[in-house]
Image (cartoon, rainbow, N blue to C red):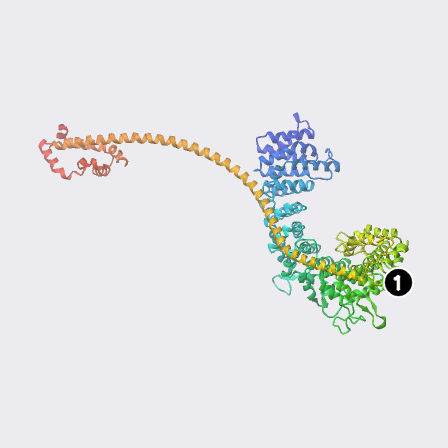
Amino acid sequence: MSFLFSGYSALRGDKGAEQTGAETVHKLCDRVQSSTLLEDRRAAVLGLKGLARDWKLDVGTRGMPVLINVLRNDRMDVDIVKASMETLNILCTHEKGSGEHSPTKTSEGSNDLELMFTEIFTKDASNVTLLLDILEEVDFYVRFFTVQLLNTLLQHSGSRLQECILTSPLGVSRERLIDLLDDRREIIRNEGLLLLIALTQNNADIQKIIAFENAFERLLGIIMDEGATDGGIIVQDCLQLTHNLLKYNVSNQNLFRETSCIQRIPSLLIVRMIADGRPTPVDAPLTDKSIVWTEQKILNAIFVLELIRILAAPKNPSALVNQNVMNYAKIVPTLNELSFSPSLPPRVRAQALYAFGDAIRGHKANQDVVSRITLPSTEFKQSRNPVSAPTPAVLQMIQVALDAGDFPIRAAAAYAFECYVYHNPDAQLTVLSTLISPPSNNPNADGNLENPESAGSLLVSSIVDWDASRKEPFRPWFAATLLSHALSENLQGQHLALATKLDEGEDAVSLLHKCMFALLCASRETADARISISILCLLCVWVYECPKAVSELLTEGSNIQFLVEQINQSSGVNPLVQGVAAFLLGLLYEFNDDSEPTFTRSSLQSLVTSRIGVDVYASRIERLREAKELNSASQDILKKDVSLVPDSHPEIYFDYMFVELFKSSHDRVVRSVTTVEAKGGSPKRKTTQLDEAEIQGFKDKIASQESELVKLRDKVPVLEQSLMENEKQETELTLLRAQVSMLQVQLAEQAKEHTSQVDLLQESIKGLQLELQDQTEKYKELENDHEDLLVYLAEQEEQMEQLQQNSGPGEGEKNEQESIVESSLPNVASGFGEGPVPNDAPITESTELLAERVPSSSKAGAHLYQQPSDHQHQDSDTAALFGTSNGGYDHFL
């Protein structure tokens, strides 16, 4: 309780007087800086935390440096670090409703303070490095509040924080930020995911570093552990982070592909469920009708499909290589099943169709897979005229696009068809060869229709019979758009369509004139402008660079008259219709080879000049160019951010392909139509032979360019590989630089540590040298003692020899001599380094022990100390001589 009392006491002035908030903050900061007890510093930090919301300005300006120093110096104390982190988070977080005493009560002023404190904190990059170092702590609250603070800083100063992280040593290494993905505590892992998602937005360097730290494997592992699409929002966050790492980042896509992550995408579209009474779960596709689709499951599935779109995006340099892997991984058939499954939610089906289109766009092998796919009729029942036999996937795309239903699904199906015929002349010709209805005995025939359905005939019937769907103008709009994609940049297909005759016998009419007639009827009956616009756009694509189609259209004078009327009218005609009609008239002039004598180039130019006027004609084109309906056209047909209003049509008028065609050629068309070729001369071309020569020259040039294009395409894989290696080396270089920085820091620390160790060792050596000197002196003293003992022993031996030579010594003298020898034995023995002989040892044992210890040079008198068995008779004789044993001997001595 002492630290609570300390915190309370800080709020009281002298003699218990109340202090102002600023004074209290000042006093608490002083206590944090000056207190020697950790308990007092902790109490002061808790006091700052309590005042941070109401007195944010004072706590931030005075206390932020203090709190940062606490994090540097008191990191070992979890409680004080946690309190400091919470306080910093409060200072940098915008909160509604400040305290009544706070000078930051207004939301605007408070927000300015948070931005200011964030800038102060991130101004010094070492502060961010400090937070990254603290992430190594295992305590839950410390890690949690640290990640929260990083998220807060990122919200207010994202670019600066990214910069600080990149400059810090190993700032985004596995041990710090990436390690958050492996934290078993879900709250910290989720906060870490949100932090990484925000960090990787719009920063390719951080994206590369994180990706090369095995991020993809970790993220896919988390997704699978959470149940893939059955998982919660954590799966969505993992997929979002994967999107950030891959989008617009070729090197990361190469890494994703090389680590076989594309092959794992189909497993993300599988669910584990118990079926047929089995005790264990089994794998089931998302098309299973028993699946319950929650909102989160829908979002997870959409994010997985969006992952495919990112890898195969039309403008992605690695799209072709990624599509190759998708072909090997059998992703296209999986997407086809999802696209046409009626059990899927509409949003998932639409996204599956878009992903299906991107996976096959411009990729011949994948497009061929689609051409071979057929689905049973039970798999597709959205059509108002369901078929009974298996339906080709191409026909199903067209049926979904034309039939009334959810518009996002229709737009996605149309996009998938456009991708199927994109740069695929064989597929275009296949569709165009079916413009005439198949025979009645065709297995795809529908008994409810007069004519059986085929891909091409379904498109044609929807255009020429637009009146049958007057209330649904997008049916003819989609039909005309899809047919224009089948005709685009395919001269053979354009000629094939020109040869198509509708009806039979004398009433046979070409498809081109049928379309013009449908356009005329739609205009007179004031049908929805989308119908007229779509047919006009179809005709523009058809006649573009196709003189034969131009001649066919000019054979009917009423066609030109209708176009002039549409352009000339000042009211009653949609401006968009007028603009497209003017553009079509310009294309008829531009690609006219004068094969139709009635409407030559000269006559058409005169017609524009006299009937319409050059200024009016140019204004119609210019107004169309500036129209928002034209400029808002999307390649996906329906933009993602467009919200559809029920029972209303979306504001879609133009196809993206037509918009590109118009923007690339409208300037040339206007100049060509409004410019007189020669003064007083005829704008007619020189000769047909010259035209043919020019055409042949163009063909030769095209052939040469195609040959060069093939060579360039062959170089693309090599260049892509080289680019991939360069980007990989660049990423490795970034990592190595970070590692060098870290190693330099470690080397400096190790150098300091080694220096201190060397100093300690040197001091230890000096002490050991002194000790060695003392021991050496003692050893010399012992050697001197040893020599003295040897001399003394020699003297004793000499005395014993003298005693032995003197015959008949008394017993007392003998005993006294033995006593003298015994008393000297311990000292003598100790002089030989073997230790003293025990005083209580018998004379016999002492003598033997001494004999062992005495060197060979000293053993001359050792026999004197053996057992007295050899001299017992001498002792008895001596005793008899003097009459007593001891007394006489003592007297003798």
Mark 1 surroundings within 10 Å by alpha-carbon count, few (fewer than 14), some (14 through 19), many (20 or more)? some
Answer with the quarter of the image where residue 741 lies. top right
Answer with the quarter of the image where residue 880 lies. top left
Q: Nearer the viewer, residue 346 or 460?
A: 460
User: What is the x, y in percent for residue 396?
Assistant: 74, 64
Q: Nearer the viewer, residue 251 or 386?
A: 251
Helix, strand or loop at mark 1: helix
Residue 763: tell me if it is visible. Answer: yes
Q: Quadrant of the N terminus?
A: top right
User: What is the x, y in percent for residue 809?
Assistant: 12, 31
Q: Which residue ends up furthest to the left in the rendered image?
A: 881
Answer with the quarter of the image where residue 710 lies. bottom right
Count of numbered badges drawn on the protein: 1
Q: Nearer the viewer, residue 254 or 7?
A: 254
Position of 235 relative to 556 (above/below)? above
Residue 42: tell me if it is visible. Answer: no
Q: Which residue ends up furthest to the bottom in the rendered image?
A: 441
Q: Which residue ends up furthest to the top in the rendered image?
A: 15
User: What is the x, y in percent for residue 133?
Assistant: 59, 40
User: What is the x, y in percent for residue 17?
Assistant: 68, 26
Q: Nearer the viewer, residue 328 or 783?
A: 328
Lateral position of residue 744 relative to residue 155, left or right? left
Position of 110 relative to 490 (above/below)? above
Q: Quadrant of the C terminus?
A: top left
Residue located beneath label 1 in the image? 558
Residue type at mark 1 is Ser
Lateral position of residue 201 relative to residue 848, left or right? right
